[in-house]
Amino acid sequence: MADQWQPGITTSSLRYRSELLQKLRNFFYQRQVIEVDVPVLARSTVTDSNVESIKSEVSGGSGYLQTSPEYFMKRLLAAGCDDIFCLGKAFRDAESGRRHNPEFTILEWYRCGWNEHQLMDEVAELITQLTDLSAQEGLSVTKRSYGECFQSVLGVDPHSAELSSLRQLAVTVGSQSWAQESRANCLDLLFSLAVEPQLSDGLVFIYDYPACQAALAQTHLNTHNQLVSRRFEVFFNKMELANGYMELTDAEQQRQRFGKDCDQRRASNKPELAIDEKLMAALDHGLPPCAGVALGVDRLLMQLQGATSIDQVMAFSWPRC
């Protein structure tokens, strides 16, 4: 414990981190994307059963440290803002390890009138510029559908497979405890443990995620006439880096999804959380057609600097606090 007062990051890496934050801001300033500063503490939080918020006592009431700036940014978009980005802190409970820290730095941005593939191209442009700055040799960029990746590794179509088959695979890959898990959770386990390790190095975009994992994304029919979500994830050298959506603008459909989140939380004996009614009011008012993406800055730093732990790229990770 005697050395825990010291930062995990070196002086040179701290300087690199500072320069990276400046480069990220410049990327958007040059494109006339407005930086917004939104609260990290609010009365409401996400209902997603796979994300745990950190609760806080505030002025005699309760609040939550935000898991991302998404809800506030969507309220700004509904109020008439155009393209915006936010670079700041986010918080998630029960997340600590080599790639996780309860407090982390997130870059999130929204492009009005764009679709998810246009946004993927911009993510690729951003990361390519940054890897050039870090003097890495060439960066390969590939795009593959979720179904293609899943089937190539596991031999099963994730969009049409029976839940019983997915549970059986999850038990094989994980443990018997997965025998009664939901479709979304089984797919998440199988992709994380079986598919992700088989992804190629470089920048890999996976798009058209299963409809059951749509979250706040629109759905559409893929080339095989299957209902999928217009969601994508970005992997950098096999590490998950970013998550993006063609944003859902239908308020009633979003309320139904939040309701299912609440049902899942109850079924999992997790704390019940109220739906963010201010976000719902914004969606009722009207969210413009847009695509958005959230990127983990600390993980980006890990890849750019070849770090093996998130502790090496931030001043004070949770064990040092």
Image (tube, rainbow, N blue to C red):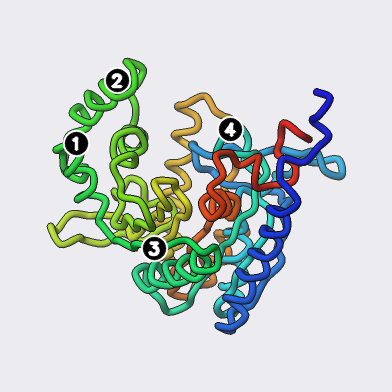
**Residue positioned 47% across, 61% down in the render:** 136
Relative height, residue 30 to residue 15 (above, below): below
- Where does the image place residue 275, in percent across and percent down from the top left? 57, 48
Q: Which mark is residue 154?
A: 1
Quick one: label 4 or label 2, which is nearer the N terminus? 4
Q: Which residue is mark 3?
A: 139
Q: Which mark is residue 97?
A: 4
Q: Are there few (<14), some (14-19), or many (20+) residues within 10 Å of tag 2?
A: some
Tag 1 and tag 3, C-beta contact below 8 Å: no
- Precedes in sequence: disc 1 or disc 4: 4
Upstream in the sequence, badge 1 or badge 2? 1
- Give, as a three-letter code, the residue at label 1: Leu
- In the picture, the quarter occupied by the C terminus is top right
Q: Is residue 152 left or right of residue 125?
A: left
Question: Could you tell me which secondary element the residue under label 3 belongs to?
Answer: loop
Q: Amino acid at mark 3?
A: Leu
Residue occupying the point 23% across, 48% down: 149
